[in-house]
Image (cartoon, rainbow, N blue to C red):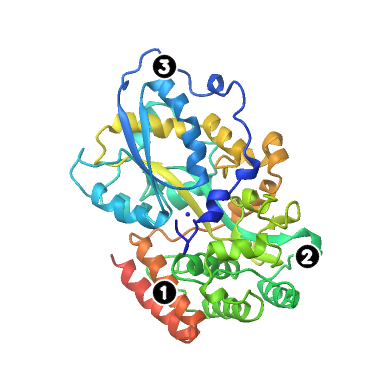
Amino acid sequence: MVRSSSRSGSARRLVAGALSVALVAGMAGSSVAVAQDQPYAGTTLNILMEDLTETQYIADLLPEFEAQTGIKVVFELVPYSNMYEKLVPQLSGPEGSGSYDVVAVDYYWPGEFARSGWMLPLDEWIARDAVDLSGIIPASFDVNGRVDGQTYYIPYYPYPMGIVYRTDLGIEIPETMDEFVEYAKSLKTDEIYGLAMQGAPTDPIAMEWLNFLFANGGDLYAEDLKTPAVNDEIGQKALAQYLDLIDNAAQTGAAGANLDDASATFAEGRAAMMVTYVTIFAGLFQNPDVSAVVDLWDVAPMPGTHQGNVGVWSFGVPKSAKSPDAAWEFVKWVTSEPVARARALKGGSPIYGAFYSDPEILALFPYLSKAAEILGAGKGLPLITKQQDLVATLGRELSEAASKRKSPQEALDAIAAKLAELADE
């Protein structure tokens, strides 16, 4: 998202591998028209990318972009855990001095990168080139697109979280979170776990628990984005529910499990349900070489408010880019509807709303019709500047509670204290 302690690792690299389809004939003709001249011919763009299947879908299409523009694109592939530490020194350098011309931005970073003055606003380019972004799911711009009223990033890859569940077990997702907790516990037997969980720090437990907080109607901050709300009655209830499931419904060792561990537990048929990234696991769960649940799973939103945790990856152009105008040409191309549709047909997570009802795409990935509900109602991280620190604090303190080193209230109070500090930065 290798990030064995986070959203990446072997599971992510297997995503949609079994369902990849050939690029539709005539794709090049339906893409952005080939320019008569190529003002940026001979330019090379260097981009740091997470090493996962979604990146490969873009890489497969790069020859088309080079043929249209004369611009060569080179991806530097790294595990997610290395991206932030490699990006920051480059982005914070003088104008034109950076190693990367385009930045792939996770939803932990948009506020910090924009407010630090590291990113170029895109609104003038969008207006000049009459770029139509209306088909992109509007909420994705709130999560990772606009900062303080300006557009700095264009979304290309959402990863909404919800529930995957076994259809062969007669499972019916309850309507409330209280009912969900009791139901998951009741499904646990000597042969199967009620819920596969990922309680390891930092990213796994933080991302998983936010679904419980949001589904109960809670949030990290009050509306002012200054006053911590995480340790109020709703936060306390959400953490109590989560810890109850870790102890009484999840697989052995769930408090130290990461995404790979939990997804493998579900794929092997050893769990009835899992709270996870619902649009990116088709390849793993549908791969008969590694999965016992082929055609035996479906997705659903979280109970309660139906607000799952929704992350978004976006592309932006840094001020330190050596070739910012050529970089903008790439951002336009890679986020365009034809290119996005080609990736969706390969198994990519769609950013255009229409793809979630597209018959050709749904014939390959029927679960997407239900994922649309999650994207429409989901929540992202609050747009404070230090979102990376927020997630690190969440993961550390929640893990302390899951491992019984701190009481739930002590952990929530520690999170609240850090959130108050981060709100002032």
**Cα gap from disc 2 to disc 3, whole angstroms:** 53 Å
Neighbour tally class for label 2: few under 14, some 14-19, many 20 plus, Cα within 10 Å: some
Q: Position of residue 255 (x, y in %)?
A: 53, 76
Is 266 above or below relative to 353? Answer: below
**Cα gap from disc 3 to disc 1, whole angstroms:** 51 Å
**One can see residue 335 in this view:** no
In contact (CB < 8 Å): disc 3 and disc 1: no
Q: Secondary structure under badge 1?
A: helix
Pick the residue in front: 87 or 263: 263
Neighbour tally class for label 3: few under 14, some 14-19, many 20 plus, Cα within 10 Å: few
Neighbour tally class for label 1: few under 14, some 14-19, many 20 plus, Cα within 10 Å: some
Q: Secondary structure under badge 3?
A: loop
Q: Residue furthest left?
A: 94
Q: Secondary structure under badge 2?
A: loop
Residue to which mark 2 is pinned: 171
Question: In the figure, is residue 297 to the left or right of 218?
Answer: right
Which residue type carries mark 1? Arg
**One can see residue 5 in this view:** yes
User: Residue at image x 71%, y 45%?
Assistant: 366
Q: How many marks?
A: 3
Q: Position of residue 353 (x, y in %)?
A: 60, 41
User: Residue at image x 68%, y 62%?
Assistant: 268
Q: Position of residue 331 (x, y in %)?
A: 40, 34
Residue to which mark 3 is pinned: 35
Pick the residue in front: 168 or 395: 168
User: Residue at image x 66%, y 63%?
Assistant: 266
Query: Which mark is nearer the camera, 3 or 1?
Result: 1
User: Which corner quadrant of the image does residue 70 belong to?
Assistant: top left
Residue to which mark 1 is pinned: 396
Which residue type carries mark 2? Ile
